[in-house]
């Protein structure tokens, strides 16, 4: 016994097979990923993750942990890796509350070469005009976080924004005297930092602050120094017992540093302080149930942290439709 719909389908398939040419052809289209934009509603905040590109970080850049332990943690985690290192995302975050737009970090612009520098273009693809951005909050002054203050023509990318940089990072990275005494491997970053902020300084748009200071619109700078002298993480209140912690460079190797928070990154300016900040930010995010936005977590880098004994685990956010407006 067969149902009528099955008989109709079988007849249609038979006719299609008879009518089909002996050799079917397939049209190939150039492959490309969709724009690096992801939206997440968090309380009364509309958070838009903006993809800048990826960089490669070598396993050897993890310190304070045995190579064998790194291998075990990376096993079956499927982090893309090539001869240059582990694929590591670079993300920035646009946060809208009402009509107020806040951008946290700006990406690399042209500082790190091809394949990066996509934040400004992705912001436009998300439907925003850079001139609408009211505040740019910098977690720290490394090139992959502030070079995007300028566009491809080295012009001001966010002409109407106030730029917020911690006093400790400004004092260090914008001072030529600091450059002279810095490790050789990071000296290139000083000139890039001065260049990126120069037009904002000239127009009075660079605002220096100290951690713990509350900014307008429910934003608080939390001290998370260690990766740089003035690194901060930005906690943004979303109301309805919701908050998002845009934590900057608390984590670079997600497959390792949640399970082993004591594993430091070679580029940390103060590794002991960086480890303490990582533990503190992870603990606060886990205990508070905060959303986390990570600059170097797999795009879109939005999710939560949970405790696992003395360590932690990353819980990526699930794709969700946006509420109707």
Image: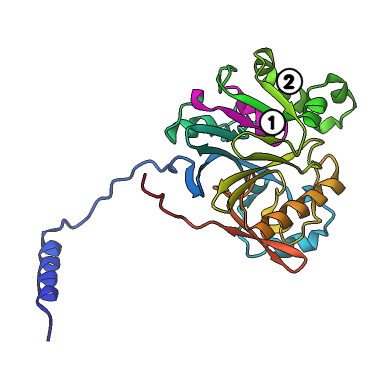
* Disc 2: which residue: 194
Q: Secondary structure at mark 1?
A: helix
Q: From the viewer's perspective, tell me whether residue 171 is left or right of residue 318.
A: right
* Disc 1: which residue: 143
Determine crowd level at label 2: few under 14, some 14-19, many 20+ residues with C-alpha closer than 10 A.
some
Q: Nearer the viewer, residue 280 or 19?
A: 280
Using the image, determine if residue 284 lies above or below residue 161: below
Question: Which of marks 2 and 1 precedes in the sequence?
Answer: 1
Q: From the viewer's perspective, tell me whether residue 311 is left or right of residue 179.
A: left
Q: Nearer the viewer, residue 33 or 211?
A: 211
- Residue found at the very far top of the displayed protein: 202
Using the image, determine if residue 23 lies above or below residue 111: below
Using the image, determine if residue 146 lies above or below residue 46: above
Residue shown at 88%/21% (left/top)? Answer: 177
Q: Is residue 144 magenta?
A: yes
Using the image, determine if residue 235 lies above or below residue 134: below
**Residue 240 at x, y percent in the picture:** 54, 52
Residue shown at 77%/60% (left/top)? Answer: 260
Determine crowd level at label 1: few under 14, some 14-19, many 20+ residues with C-alpha closer than 10 A.
many
Looking at the image, can residue 111 be seen? no
Magenta residues span 131-151
Do labels 1 and 2 touch, CB within 8 Å? no
**Residue 135 at x, y percent in the picture:** 59, 29
**Residue 113 at x, y percent in the picture:** 62, 30
**Residue 241 at x, y percent in the picture:** 58, 54
Q: From the viewer's perspective, tell me whether residue 266 is left or right of residue 145.
A: right
């Amino acid at each position: 016994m067969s149902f009528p719909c099955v008989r109709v389908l079988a007849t249609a398939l038979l006719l299609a097979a008879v009518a089909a040419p002996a050799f079917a052809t397939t049209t190939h289209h150039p492959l490309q990923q969709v724009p690096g934009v992801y939206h997440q509603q968090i309380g009364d905040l509309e958070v838009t993750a903006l993809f800048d590109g990826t960089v490669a970080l070598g396993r050897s850049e993890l310190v304070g942990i045995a190579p064998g332990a790194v291998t075990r943690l990376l096993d079956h985690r499927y982090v893309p890796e090539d001869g240059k290192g582990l694929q590591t995302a670079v993300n920035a975050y646009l946060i809208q509350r009402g009509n107020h737009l806040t951008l946290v970090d700006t990406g690399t612009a042209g500082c790190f070469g091809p394949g990066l520098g996509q934040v400004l273009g992705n912001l436009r693809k998300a439907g925003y005009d850079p001139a609408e951005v009211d505040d740019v909050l910098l977690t720290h002054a490394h090139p992959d976080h502030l070079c995007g203050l300028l566009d491809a023509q080295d012009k001001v990318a966010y002409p109407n924004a106030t730029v917020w940089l911690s006093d400790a990072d400004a004092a260090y990275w914008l001072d030529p005297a600091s450059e002279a005494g810095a490790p050789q491997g990071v000296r290139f970053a000083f000139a890039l930092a001065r260049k990126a902020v120069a037009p904002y300084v000239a127009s009075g748009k660079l605002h220096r602050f100290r951690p713990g200071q509350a900014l307008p619109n429910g934003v608080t700078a939390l001290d998370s120094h260690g990766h740089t002298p003035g690194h901060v993480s930005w906690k943004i209140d979303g109301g309805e017992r919701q908050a998002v912690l845009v934590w900057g460079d608390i984590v670079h190797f997600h497959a390792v540093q949640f399970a082993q928070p004591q594993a430091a990154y070679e580029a940390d300016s103060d590794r002991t302080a960086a480890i303490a900040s990582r533990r503190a930010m992870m603990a606060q995010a886990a205990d508070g149930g905060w959303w986390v936005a990570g600059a170097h977590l797999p795009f879109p880098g939005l999710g939560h942290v949970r405790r696992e004994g003395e360590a932690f685990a990353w819980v990526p956010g699930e794709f969700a439709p946006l509420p109707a407006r």
